[in-house]
Image (tube, helix red, strand yellow):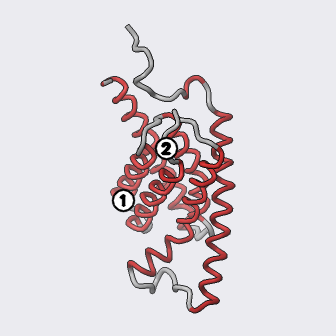
Amino acid sequence: MGNYRWRWITTLGILAALWAAIELSLGTTLYLLRVPLRGEFLTVLTLPLMFATRSLIPRRGSVLAVGLTAAVVRWLLGGAFAPQVSLAIAVEALLVELGLGPVNGGAIVRWRGALAGALGMGYTAAHPVLFWGLLLGGGKGIELPVGIGGLLFFGAILGLHLIGGAAAGIWARTLLSRLTVPLMKPISDDVERPQ
């Protein structure tokens, strides 16, 4: 069991480092260039990584562990809006973990991939409102929608994010299934141990 535990930890560490590197390099660059929809773009890029985590380490909480580790690394290494981004990474990982549901030997069924993607992308839309609006009281980041028109507008934006996230989840699952090779077998302690 010990050997497999170290393989899980090593794999989780590599995946978390990759996620943190994406956030620190590409995420910071997109922020500095003021690219619109940068959070959505980063979510689409990290969904295959989260799905690969579940496939390689078919354990409950593996996606959340990678997300929390990436969030801590992102926070420690700083960069643009480190607390805000770290919180978004952690919550997104939690929602994707919940969307993927029970562990099924590392396999991700299509509708679960779509649900996980929708939840992750949906939070990308809600994060600015929750972080800047509710936690920090508005101001610099965003103005909360006002009245029925504002709520309908936010609902439409959220709906588009959910649909786009579901499509991104299906894409990530399809991409992962095409890249699955013998080297990407799930790490399991059920496999016969070498002599």
| Front one among 82 and 144 | 144
Pointers 2 and 1 in contact (C-beta within 8 Å): no
Name the residue nearer the viewer: 164 or 183.
164
Q: Image check: 23 left or right of 167?
A: left
The residue lying toward the viewer, choosing from 19 and 109, is 109
The residue pinned by badge 1 equals 75
Q: Secondary structure at mark 2?
A: loop
Residue at the image point whose x is 44% and y is 85% from the top: 138
Quick check: 194 left or right of 174?
A: left
Disc number placed over residue 182 in the picture, else none: none
The residue identified by callout 2 is 102
Residue 136 x %, y % = 38, 80
Residue 85: x, y in percent? Answer: 44, 64
- On screen, residue 145 above or below 99: below
Q: Amino acid at mark 1?
A: Trp
Q: Quadrant of the N terminus?
A: top left
Is the residue 152 above or below the residue 52 in the image? below
Tell me residue 175's x, y (percent). Answer: 67, 41
Disc 2/disc 1 C-alpha distance (Å)? 29 Å
| Residue count near mark 1 (Cα–Cα under 10 Å), binned few <14, some 14–19, many ≥20 | many
Disc 1, SS: helix
Which residue is depicted at the point 40% across and 55% down? 71
> In which quadrant is the C terminus drawn?
top left
80 relative position to 49: left or right: left
Residue at 48% from the left image edge and 53% from the top image edge:
98
Name which residue type carries label 2: Pro
* Picture coordinates of residue 119, whole percent (x, y): 55, 60
Which comes before the other along the chain, label 2 or label 1? Answer: 1
Q: Count residues near mark 2 (Cα–Cα under 10 Å), then give few for <14, some for 14-19, many for 20+.
A: some
- Seen as rendered, the residue at the extreme top is 195
> Would you identify the image quadrant in which residue 17 lies?
top left
Q: Nearer the viewer, mark 2 or mark 1?
A: 2
